[in-house]
Image (cartoon, helix red, strand yellow):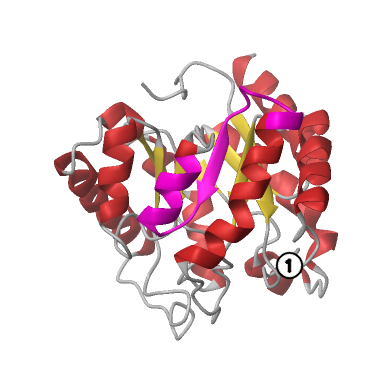
């Protein structure tokens, strides 16, 4: 059974990129020691989930082999389980079944697949066998092609329809419906106006009956809109999207800056419950 309860407070997912080339924090947490310290800091600031990824999926990024991803993420998962917590949910951010399978064996509890099972369909079987939550994200194209003039007939309808097709594929693969989490894929094969429309109409995705994750943290559309060259300066802007997402019904918010977004989530939830 999924840990996401519709009536409960939304969860905050802290991003831990163990990569040299992620768009915002690439290279900062490559060593297990630095990654562990950052995970500890995020937990202290209020993260409910740690999302660990060993492959950058920023626009035009190069795919990373399963072996390289495993080399990057497994020591970090082991270190968190040994030194920080045996119970904190750990999400493995990967498109590859081999990485997901080993990560789950070493202590991860959630799969976060930006391709929703399209890159490696066996990842759906891994989730079904483990009976663990899996996040299915919308992406038009691949990281290498997704920002080559993305186009939609109607972005909200198109994204919802695609995700419901992936829900059907996941259920067909044996995944329990209560283990499915949907992500509209902000910045993944979208222009700025697409991202803004998806956030504005996020409630429509939330109304489909599955928990929704929003991952808008430090995304390019914010930089373009606010003319901010440094993604690190977007914590306040990200917190605004967190509050909006909570009000729309999102169940998980994925962020880099835990402290600011913890405050935004808690306040928005209090307002929503008032």
Q: Residue at x 26, y 57 (%)?
A: 121
In this picture, which residue range is highlighted in magenta? 82-104
Q: Secondary structure at mark 1?
A: loop
Q: Residue at x 73, y 70 (%)?
A: 223
Q: Residue at x 58, y 71 (%)?
A: 58
Q: Is residue 186 magenta?
A: no
142 on left or right of 19: left
In the rendered image, the quadrant that contains the N terminus is: top left
90 on left or right of 95: right
* Furthest residue in direction left, as rendered: 172
Kindly identify which residue carries mark 1. 26
Q: Is residue 223 above or below residue 196?
A: below
Q: Is residue 219 above or below residue 111?
A: below
Whether residue 187 is visible to the viewer of this picture, yes or no, is: no
Front position in the image: 270 or 95: 95
Q: Position of residue 33 (x, y in %)?
A: 81, 49
Q: Position of residue 189 (x, y in %)?
A: 45, 72
Q: Is residue 271 above or below residue 153?
A: above
């Amino acid at each position: 059974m999924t840990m996401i309860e519709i009536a409960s407070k939304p969860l905050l997912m802290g991003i831990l990129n163990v990569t040299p080339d992620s768009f915002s924090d690439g290279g900062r947490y490559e060593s297990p020691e630095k990654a562990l310290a950052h995970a500890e800091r995020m937990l202290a600031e209020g993260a409910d989930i740690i999302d660990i990824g060993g492959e950058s999926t920023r626009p035009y990024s190069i795919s990373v082999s399963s072996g390289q991803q495993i080399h990057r993420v497994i020591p970090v998962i082991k270190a968190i389980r040994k030194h920080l917590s045996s119970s904190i949910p750990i999400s493995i951010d990967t498109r590859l079944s081999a990485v997901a399978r080993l990560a789950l064996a070493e202590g991860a509890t959630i799969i976060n697949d930006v391709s929703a099972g399209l890159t490696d369909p066996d990842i759906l079987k891994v989730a079904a066998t483990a009976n663990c939550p899996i996040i299915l994200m919308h992406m038009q194209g691949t990281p290498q092609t997704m920002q080559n003039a993305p186009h939609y007939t109607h972005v909200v309808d198109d994204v919802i329809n695609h995700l419901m097709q992936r829900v059907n594929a996941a259920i067909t693969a044996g995944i329990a419906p209560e283990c499915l989490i949907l992500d509209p894929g902000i910045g993944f094969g979208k222009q700025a106006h697409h991202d803004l429309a998806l956030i504005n109409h996020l409630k429509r995705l939330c109304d489909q009956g599955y928990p929704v994750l929003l991952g808008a943290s430090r995304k390019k559309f914010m930089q373009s809109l606010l003319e901010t060259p440094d993604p690190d300066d977007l914590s306040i802007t990200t917190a605004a999207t967190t509050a909006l997402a909570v009000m729309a019904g999102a169940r998980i918010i994925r962020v880099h800056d835990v402290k600011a977004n913890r405050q935004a989530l808690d306040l928005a939830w209090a307002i929503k419950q008032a």
